[in-house]
Image: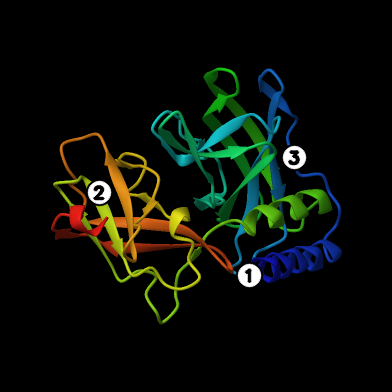
Amino acid sequence: MQTIRSFLILVSALVGMASSPALAVETAWQEVAPGVQVRLIGSGTPQPDGRLLIGLEVDMPQSTKIYWHVPGETGVPTEIDLSRSSGITLHETLWPYPLIDNQEGLTDYAYYGHTVVPVAVTLSGGAATVDAKLMMGVCSDVCIPVSASFTMPLKRGDSAPGQDLRMAQALAEVPLEWSDAEPAVGGVRYDAADEVLVIEEVAPGIDPVSIIADVGIDGQLFGAPQKSRDTNLVLIPLLGGDGLTETAVRLTFMTDEGPFSTWSDIALGGSTAAER
């Protein structure tokens, strides 16, 4: 269950906090839009794989949103650029599962209210300096692109209980790689006539209307999933373009045990008109 998964992650964070000195690892808040502040937080408590965590923390009203790395039809993707950092050899942004936001017939993938986006980093040895550049879209009554820059030292052992707890809560919403013996879906095919992805035989425990299809930020966009009325199919429309060019798609979805993600090959298929 999701509650058990979240509990185990939080317990792991609390154990790390108990053995680490309480040192402040954070930047000052920067206001990037009215009522919206951002900052960088960090944890020197190693994860099980040895990596350390930093995180983008966004303080904004519950009615205000920012976007997932694949924003959808109207948004601006959230981008965290660490290329100017020193002492960091690798980094991976760990995106929490977003809200499928449908408004006025348009689909976006968004975070509302207080948000933390963790980033796992591998140090080259000893201390490191995080030099991060942020670009994202902020939407309330109007939508505006914003940017900010942060510099923060990071080393093993430096930690603060508040940051560890906030990042542990965010990690509980980061999709895990689907690794069960049973495939997440029976197959994925593209119906060129109707311009939809057809997802077949969704595994038990997966919420069909939670499925997000994406092929990366520079790839083609897909809309909100629709459960077929008469069959065990999920239909995801292709948005714009001249047909699908990719041969594989990443599916991210919510289950009884929390969010997961998996890649699937795309096959060509016939019309779904009779199946609806």
Number of dots carrying numbers: 3
Helix, strand or loop at disc 2? Answer: strand
Amino acid type at mark 1? Pro
Read off the residue under disc 3: 26
Among the two numbered marks 3 and 1 on one chain, the one whose residue lies closer to the N terminus: 3
Give the quarter of the image for residue 111: top right
Amino acid type at mark 2? Val
Say whether residue 26 is left or right of residue 187. Answer: right
Query: Distance of mark 2 from mark 3, alpha carbons?
Result: 44 Å
Query: Distance of mark 2 from mark 1, alpha carbons?
Result: 40 Å
Q: Which mark is residue 171?
A: none
Helix, strand or loop at disc 1? Answer: loop
Residue 27 rendering spot, x and y as whole percentages: 73, 34
Amino acid type at mark 3? Glu
Extreme-bottom residue of the structure: 181
Say whether residue 21 is left or right of residue 143. Answer: right
Display coloring: rainbow
- In this view, the mark in front (2 or 3): 2
Residue placed at 45% from the left, 70% from the top?
Answer: 178
Read off the residue under disc 2: 196
Q: Which mark is residue 48?
A: 1
Query: Distance of mark 3 from mark 1, alpha carbons?
Result: 22 Å
Among the two numbered marks 2 and 3 on one chain, the one whose residue lies closer to the N terminus: 3
Above-or-below relation of 226 to 29: below
90 or 260: nearer the viewer: 260
Residue 195 rendering spot, x and y as whole percentages: 21, 45
Residue placed at 81% from the left, 49% from the top?
Answer: 162
Among the two numbered marks 2 and 1 on one chain, the one whose residue lies closer to the N terminus: 1
Question: Which quadrant of the figure contains the N terminus?
Answer: bottom right
Give the quarter of the image for residue 18: bottom right
Question: Which quadrant of the figure contains the C terminus?
Answer: bottom left
